[in-house]
Image (spheres, grey):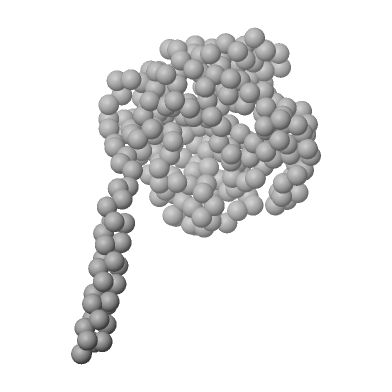
Amino acid sequence: MKKLILTVVAALMMCFVAVSTTSCKRQVAEPTIAATEDASNFVRLTDVVPDAILEIRYYGTYNFVGTRIDGYLAPTAWLTKPAADSLKAVSDDVIQQGYRLKIYDAYRPQKGVDHFVRWAQNIPDTVMKRYFYPDLDKSVLFEQEYIYEKSGHTRGSTVDLTLFDMNTEKELDMGGTFDWFGPESHPDFCGNPETGEYTGNNKPSPQGRSITAEQFKNRMILRAAMLRHGFKPLDSEWWHFTLKDEPYPDTYFTFDVK
């Protein structure tokens, strides 16, 4: 009898530990990301950086979806005031080097991100495949993290951009197009972005592609200027930068670009 009681007590204690552990896990709060329409701390990018050239890809049809993206009602760009001020410093920096900033995207409303998600789930729609993801089956876009349900752009302090060469009056040759889905877009493709050293074709490319030393150097000119003025890079896109001290790290915005 005594042995039976001890067995029952031990079993009850194990259940208690299991329930307690489960309860503790449930009490760990997920990060709260709040949505808001409040645009009071945003500015029109060209009001702060008048030298910037705008080519807002998601207002037009030359993008990986092939249509205008929801929430883009005008070919303009918005950023939080701190991000725009830092981008002005970047602009002043590169102008001294003979370049201007060319902006592809800045603040992105959540409805635009939702549009990307719906498109990615519609596997048969591959109208723009040959331009932006010829080496990928569309079904892997979520798995390989090319499409997310949340984007840093919706927080208002992220920008996609390149450099415009004022001598040639053309975009600086970066060896690849904006929004190309593949390793060729990674900052460390054919080089070390930490040292600026060109290393040649050091990463796998589905079709054996590479970029030249000059193209890698051009990417590093943009990267260095952005990092000098408070932005941090993304390890999968040479054109994508976010303000390190972004004012709204836990908020996503929903107002339209207009």
Dividing the picture into quadrants, the one containing residue 101 is top right
Q: Position of residue 215 (x, y in %)?
A: 73, 30
Residue at (70%, 52%) from the top-left corner?
Answer: 206
Q: Position of residue 167 (x, y in %)?
A: 71, 13
Dividing the picture into quadrants, the one containing residue 2 is bottom left
Side of 203 where 120 appears, left or right: left
Side of 175 where 156 appears, left or right: left
Dividing the picture into quadrants, the one containing residue 21 is bottom left
Side of 104 where 254 appears, left or right: left
Q: Position of residue 12 (x, y in %)?
A: 23, 74
Look at the picture and state if 16 lies above or below 223: below
Q: How many marks?
A: 0
Asked if residue 130 shows in the view, the reply is no
Asked if residue 164 shows in the view, the reply is yes
Name the quarter where the C terminus is drawn: top left
Q: Position of residue 245 (x, y in %)?
A: 44, 25
Look at the picture and state if 43 lies above or below 67: above
- Depth check: give the residue in front, 247 or 90: 247
Residue at (45%, 12%) from the top-left corner?
Answer: 48
Q: Residue furthest bottom?
A: 1
Name the quarter where the N terminus is drawn: bottom left
Residue at (43%, 12%) from the top-left corner?
Answer: 47
Look at the picture and state if 26 lies above or below 3: above
- Depth check: give the residue in front, 159 or 103: 159
Residue at (26%, 59%) from the top-left corner?
Answer: 23
